[in-house]
Image: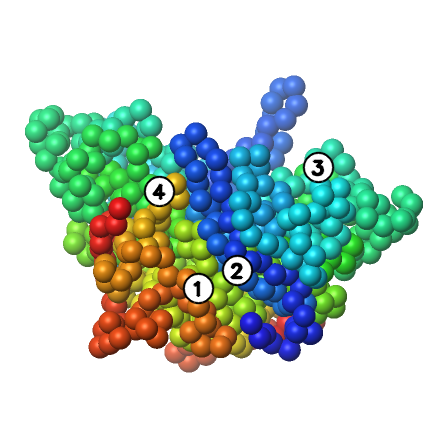
Amino acid sequence: MSTTNNASAKQPLLEVQGLKTYFYTEDGVVQAINGVDFTIHPGEVMGLVGESGSGKSVTSLSIMRLLPSSGKIVEGQVRLDGKDLLTLPEEKMVKLRGNEISMIFQQPASCLNPVFRIGDQIAETIMVHQDLNKREAWQQAVEMLRKVGIPAPEKRATAFPHEISGGQAQRVMIAMALSCQPRLLIADEPTTALDVTIQAQIFDLMRQLRDDTGTAILLITHDMGVIAEMCDTVAVMYAGQIVEYANVATLFDQPLHPYTEGLLAAIPTLGEMKETLAVIPGSVPNLIHLPQGCKFAPRCPYVKAEICTTNTPDLRDITPDHRARCYMRFPETAHHWAGVGKANWQFKGDEVLVEVI
Amino acid sequence: MSISLKAAAKDLLVVDNLKTYFPIKAGLLQRVVANVKAVDGVSFTIREGETFGLVGESGCGKTTVGRTILRLQPATAGSVFFDGEDVFAKRGGDLKALRRNMQIVFQDPYSSLDPRVPVGETIAEGLEIHGVTSRRERQDIVLEMLDKVGLNPYHANRYPHEFSGGQRQRIGIARALALRPRFIICDEPVSALDVSIQSQILNLLRELSHEFGLTYLFIAHNLSVVEHISDRVGVMYLGTLVEVTDRSELYHNPLHPYTQALLSAIPIPKPGMRRQRIVLRGEIPSPINPPSGCRFHTRCPFAAEICTHEVPLLEEKAPGHWAACHFVESVGNTARLQPAVVHPPENISS
């Protein structure tokens, strides 16, 4: 996937291929992600967008191998700079986390240890991965706090997590995550719990740090506005699979997958003054009992049962930089939709468009 | 702000200088040492049939305003008039009769329904309290309400855990609607829902307002959602209203610096759209000890000396457009922010 000029070499930084992660629960096997493929280049900001149950968080946890005990990566490859992460022994993986790949989460306050000072927590990360003594690590921690825009960092470093706000806590997490200059930062809904004016500050910070350090970012969110503002490329996830994958400009300009189209039309956009919003009928499928064929078919206004509900479409290049998982777009089946106009998405909510077992 | 209490016959709700403080007690004798000034002098009116959006970030007091209006929270000062009647003066049977007309839809569809009661009974609860004694009649109304919100009759016997978040929110709406109120407060009704479910609920709320002639106070932190559904919008910051106007005017001509910053901070799903981003300095101050003068001065890119000691009043700067700022001036038939001072921006990106 070619990207903006922010990405340097063509050599990919992270390659995810055919990733499948299942959770083994009392109720059955939850197919959280079912074949995910994407590539991130150095310096690129890639967005992973989807709603509840789409599998976006599980994808990031799988890459980091931080799944809970009930989760297993059953198939696939994850390669960082060419080396396979899934077969790495755990000691090597520990060395990688916080060092080459870092991660920040949604609730920053719950990621910080309440009984240690902030400076100590950042210094801890530094000492684990670098050969510095306590004093040197502390100095570097203060520098990181300065870089992330915390005022009077020498003083703030002595504060405890409960003494700082949510926005500041997320800056501390970013400081911690970037303290060892990782190649990739995974940010899982980093601003969802923050106010929108604080969110703007955090994203400005992330962009600036990316420009300064060349760190690639995998940004996970449910907010299409954030994708438009921050990302170079975007993958839309639904029911454990990527259904569309493109450059940001291309995706917003011409969404190919019906789910993306519906999602964009369902969001109230500032300044557009729409009368009614698009409604995607039905609800997300049960990940234990997934429908046969295309997972979005039961909710798709373009569905043609004979074609869509037998086999799952694969994710294919429709144009060189734009992949979609939809029979309506594949050259060999597109003719069935000749003359079909744009759906108006005027549903009430609970409709089922096609019964799929 | 002076409110004409001989308000137009179309004004359904009049809020006058409302204050709600939460006392902080400390020490052996549990003396009140300070107050969280959640709502600190808020005044606005809502016309019948209108959807009034109240928007603001954490700690601005918007939820407390809603709860105080309904007397779910006692007010510290100020008054609320519903259809000309003093809400805070009502007692006993009169209060009950008033409450029939003022209902609420809560934010959390998971905690706002009694998990041990079938939803049909939850919807009917208000009916029973307000004297609809015939079981048959209650049942009929419940079925009618379920239908109006897009659910099926058999859903009445199910328990909340058997429904999705979006469906539970519909049940909450059915409950609020059952008594055919004139006024419904929607307190962050879609914040806990996925994007694709939000649109279902927003469309439903709009439809019901047309069908039943409802008046809404729509409280949310998401300005895009508020702008979509509201006729007029009030922007709150740290317990006070900083701007009030109709939604189109708010978007096209935001007067208050906070509103401008808020609008510029919202990520828009349109890549490549170049906007003038105003990044606010610092954090939202604590409502226990709000800044002197204009509460926003600690973060305002245009704060001048006067802002640190003189509280700007919410005034009508242009017809139908109210703002609380020393530097917003009326210019003919419109108004403009004319700052005297501009602080150098920090971390501003294009």
> Disc 1 to disc 3, how far (Cα)?
42 Å
Q: Mark 3 points at which residue?
A: A113
**Which residue is under mark 2?**
A37
Q: In the picture shown, does residue A49 fall above or below A327?
A: above
Disc 4: host chain? A
**Residue in the picture at 65% in, 57% down:** A79
Q: Distance between the residues labelled 2 and 4?
A: 22 Å
Three-letter residue code for mark 3 = Asn
Disc 4 designates what residue?
Answer: A289
Q: Which amino acid does label 2 sit on?
A: Asp
Q: Earlier in the sequence, mark 1 or mark 3?
A: 3
Q: How far apart are marks 2 and 3 (CA)?
A: 35 Å
First in sequence: mark 2 vs mark 4? 2
Residue at 57 percent across and 37 percent down: it is: A68
Q: Do labels 1 and 4 share a chain?
A: yes
Q: Is residue A324 above or below residue A146?
A: below
Question: For mark 1, what is the residue?
Answer: A315
